[in-house]
Image (cartoon, helix red, strand yellow):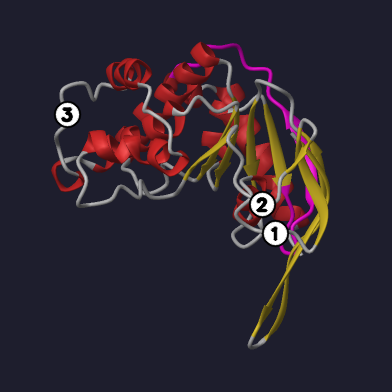
């Protein structure tokens, strides 16, 4: 995926909001890329534009030869909340993207994914019968079920408790290592970004610009315990200082 000069302005009743300013980035095939920055820096705006859900004011985003101006069959998105429809059970929620595309659900793939995330046997359950972590696992299955080449994740674990968040970070790392998907992951957590990413894109305060790109060379698979090591803590502090000192 290639982002070239992406800029976004919103017109509001109180004036124009300049959300993104000339963001350019080459996302490597198969990498785990985290985008990090202060609140309101345009991270989600950028991600939604990658998904074809927001138009840009200028610039462009391409996946291979295709310019992204609308939802693309090779791109799936997982939101901050699981967004499961309460009147549908787990099985029919996961089948929804196939219905929208008017294609037959890949039952074998869905079954393997449900088994992989620990939800096999819960197909008939409704969202109210699932914990927050289970709902987010279901949203991951729904995103991966259509076998996209790019998976966009907009702070998907931010509302979870610390223990469940650790479990989900381990799970998404394992799934990424198994599938080789390109994952672009938005987070407010420096530790989460450092734990998950091959590279971290650090964005400036609004209007969002790329401030720094940090290469993460920690060996994989990364256990949760790596976060308590002096090297990891020092790296977290370095990135925090980078963000704090360059806020404008």
Cα gap from disc 2 to disc 3, whole angstroms:
33 Å
Q: Is residue 215 magenta?
A: yes
In the image: residue 201, left or right of residue 166: right
The correct choice, above or below, for 244 with respect to 104 in the image is below
Check disc 3 and report the residue beneath it: 122
Residue 223: x and y in percent read 45, 16
Counting other residues with Cα less than 10 Å from the Cα at mark 1, is it few (<14), some (14-19), or many (20 or more)? many
Which is nearer the N-term, disc 2 or disc 1? 2
Instruction: Identify the mark at residue 49; answer none if there is no mark.
Output: 2
- Residue beneath disc 1: 55
**Residue 227 percent across, percent down from the top left:** 49, 26
Q: Residues within 10 Å of mark 2 (few under 14, many from 20)?
A: many
Our reading of the magenta stretch's main secondary structure is loop
Which type of secondary structure does the marked residue at label 1 adopt? Answer: loop
Q: Where in the figure is residue 96, as x and y percent of width and height?
A: 36, 41
219 and 149: which is toward the camera: 149
Quote the CA–CA distance across marks 2 and 1: 6 Å
Asked if labels 1 and 2 touch by Cβ distance under 8 angstroms, the answer is: yes
Q: Left or right of 102: which side holds 242?
A: right
Residue 120 relative to residue 6: left or right: left
Magenta-tinted stretch: 203-223
The extreme bottom residue here reads 13
**Residue at the (23%, 37%) spot, across then down:** 90
Q: Residue at x 43, y 44 (%)?
A: 100
Instruction: Check residue 219 in the rendering and tell me which mark sits there, or answer none.
Output: none
Residue 224 position in % (x across, y down): 43, 22
Quarter residue 68 falls in = top right
Could you give the CA–CA distance between mark 3 and mark 1, rounded to whole angstroms? 37 Å
Where does the C terminus fall, quadrant-wise?
bottom right
């Amino acid at each position: 995926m290639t982002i070239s000069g992406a800029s976004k302005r919103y017109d509001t009743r109180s004036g124009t909001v300049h959300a993104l300013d000339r963001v350019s980035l080459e996302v490597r095939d198969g990498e785990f890329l985290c985008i990090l920055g202060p609140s309101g820096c345009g991270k989600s705006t950028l991600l939604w534009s990658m998904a074809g859900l927001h138009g840009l004011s200028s610039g462009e985003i391409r996946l291979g030869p295709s310019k992204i101006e609308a939802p693309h069959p090779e791109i799936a998105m997982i939101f901050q909340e699981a967004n499961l429809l309460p009147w549908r059970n787990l099985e029919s929620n996961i089948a929804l993207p196939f219905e929208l595309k008017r294609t037959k659900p890949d039952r074998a793939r869905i079954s393997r994914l449900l088994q992989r995330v620990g939800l096999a046997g819960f197909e008939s359950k409704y969202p109210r019968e699932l914990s927050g972590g289970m709902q987010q696992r279901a949203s991951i299955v729904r995103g991966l079920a259509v076998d996209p080449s790019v998976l966009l994740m907009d702070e998907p674990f931010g509302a979870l408790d610390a223990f469940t968040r650790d479990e989900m970070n381990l799970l998404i790392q394992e799934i990424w290592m198994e599938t080789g998907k390109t994952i672009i992951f938005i987070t407010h957590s420096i530790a989460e970004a450092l734990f998950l990413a091959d590279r971290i894109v650090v964005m400036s305060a609004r209007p969002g610009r790329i401030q720094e790109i940090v290469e993460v060379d920690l060996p994989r698979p990364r256990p949760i315990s790596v976060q308590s090591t002096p090297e990891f803590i020092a790296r977290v502090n370095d990135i925090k200082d980078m963000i704090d000192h360059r806020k404008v």
